[in-house]
Image: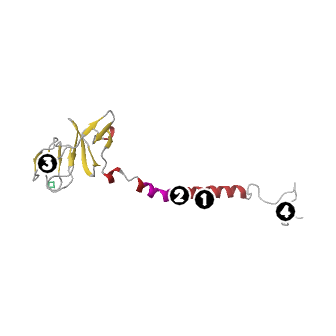
């Protein structure tokens, strides 16, 4: 056979096949296992996606139930900052003031807007009509008919617990 002729048929044992080294066909068993694993992983992912809404339905988030107790990591609330959480179905503002932690129902007694903490003036303000509350919840200004409602709060070494 001359060098320009192509080999016909499979190569005999010990004979060169004429194929380029390194370009071997993938092992069909390994490819099948790989595809089975991929399908298994996709099936598992699909099952999780199908079950997740059921788990969420069975165990709704505490906010939806109006949790009777909300824990906040103290490290996540440095001095001068605030966090609004949902406690018993209502927005509750927790503030780390220079005098300690305070918590109030954040619903303004005027017309129901949610108050915000203003660190610069050390007060709680209502953005709707300019109502102002002191850190003790008392009315400091604006058309507000009464003070904010205090919420029970306790503090441990690493947690702030709203609702005891
Ligand atoms: S709703 Fe807060 S001041 Fe009017």
Tell me whether circle 1 and circle 4 mark residues in contact (CB < 8 Å). no
SS of the residue under disc 3: strand
Callout 1 environment at 10 Å: few (<14), some (14 to 19), or many (20+)?
Answer: few
SS of the residue under disc 2: helix
Q: Is residue 90 magenta?
A: no
The span shown in magenta is 48-55
Quarter of the image that includes the N terminus: bottom right
Disc 2 versus disc 1: distance between alpha carbons? 12 Å
- Front-most of residues 31 and 49: 49
Of marks 2 and 1, which one's residue comes earlier in the chain? Answer: 1
Q: Quadrant of residue 96?
A: top left
Report the mark closest to the observer, 2 or 4: 2
Callout 2 environment at 10 Å: few (<14), some (14 to 19), or many (20+)?
Answer: few
Direction from residue 19 to residue 162 in the image, left or right: left
Callout 3 environment at 10 Å: few (<14), some (14 to 19), or many (20+)?
Answer: many
Disc 3 versus disc 4: distance between alpha carbons? 91 Å
Residue at the far top: name it: 157
Q: Find disc 2 in the rendering and name its residue.
A: 47
């Amino acid at each position: 056979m001359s060098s320009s002729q192509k080999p016909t048929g499979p190569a005999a044992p010990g004979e060169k096949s004429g194929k380029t080294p390194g370009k071997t066909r993938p092992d069909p068993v390994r490819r099948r296992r790989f595809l089975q694993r991929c399908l298994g992983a996709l099936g598992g992912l699909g099952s999780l996606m199908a079950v997740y809404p059921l788990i969420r339905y069975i165990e709704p988030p505490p906010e939806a139930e109006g949790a009777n107790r909300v824990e906040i990591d103290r490290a996540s609330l440095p001095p001068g900052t605030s966090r609004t959480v949902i406690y018993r179905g209502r927005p509750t503002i927790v503030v780390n003031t220079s005098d300690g932690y305070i918590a109030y129902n954040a619903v303004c007694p005027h017309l129901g807007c949610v108050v915000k903490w203003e660190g610069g003036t050390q007060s709680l303000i209502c953005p709707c009509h300019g109502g102002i509350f002191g850190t003790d919840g008392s009315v400091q200004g604006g058309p507000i008919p009464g003070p904010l409602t205090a919420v029970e709060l306790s503090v441990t070494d690493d947690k702030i617990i709203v609702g005891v």
